[in-house]
Amino acid sequence: MVALGCLVLFAACGGKEDPTEAVRDFLSRGSRMAEEHDVKALMELTTEGFSLEPQGMDRHEVRKALLFVFRHYGSFRILYPKPRIQFKEREKRARVALPFVIVRKEVSIPGLKQLLDDPREWVEEVGDRADLYWLELELFRGSGESWKAEVARIRPLGPGMR
C-alpha cells in the first residue's frame, strides 16, 4: 500500500512551454499536492480510464488508497532525482521513469541535492536510508490540454533490485 504514494507525483501542467520542462513541472507540482494531502486535485489529474499497475486499481480504488497512504505517513516529503522522459506522438504522450521515496518531514537525507542529475548515485545514496520505489507514468496531453496520467506502474527497489 505504501507504494501508492507514487501517485503524489501527479500535477497539472500544459501550455506551449518546453515539453520536458512541462513534465518536470507536472512532477514537482504533483508532489506538492500530495504533500498537502489534496486527493481531489491529484485525482483530477488522471484520465477517466486511469489505472495503477500491477495492483490493477482504478481511479476510485486509488482515491481510497491515497487516503490510507496519507494517514500512514502523516506529514511527509517526496524526493526524486531528475526523471527520464520519452515523448511520443508529437509530444502528446510521454513516458516518465524515476526512482522516488516518501519520507516523513522530520527525516533528513543529506547530500541528495548534489546527486539530482545522477539517478544511479541518487539511488545508491538514498537506498540504504528509506524505502525506495521505481515509478513509470504514462501521460497524455490533448491539444491545448494539461498533462493527465493514464497509467502508473510501481515496484519496490529493494537491495537486490537496484
Image (tube, rainbow, N blue to C red):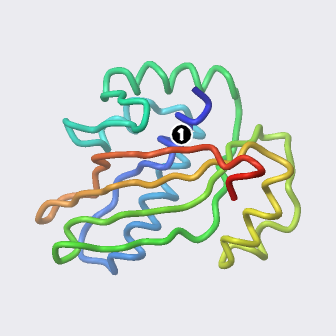
- Which quadrant is home to the C terminus? bottom right
Q: In the rendered image of this protein, does residue 95 appear above or below residue 71?
A: below
**Is 133 on the left-hand or right-hand side of 24?**
right
Closer-to-camera residue (54/47): 54
- Residue found at x 47% / y 41%: 7
Name the residue that disc number 1 marks.
34
- Look at label 1 and name its amino acid: Ala
Quadrant placement of the N terminus:
top right
At x 11%, y 65%, the residue is 143
User: Could you tell whether 16 is left or right of 162 in the image?
Assistant: left
Q: Residue at x 19, y 67 (%)?
A: 92
Please provide percent x and percent y for residue 4: 52, 34
In x, y percent, where is residue 35?
60, 40
> Of residues 43 and 92, which is closer to you in this image?
92
Outermost residue toward the left?
143
Location of residue 23 (image quadrant): bottom left
Residue 122 lies in what quarter of the image? bottom right
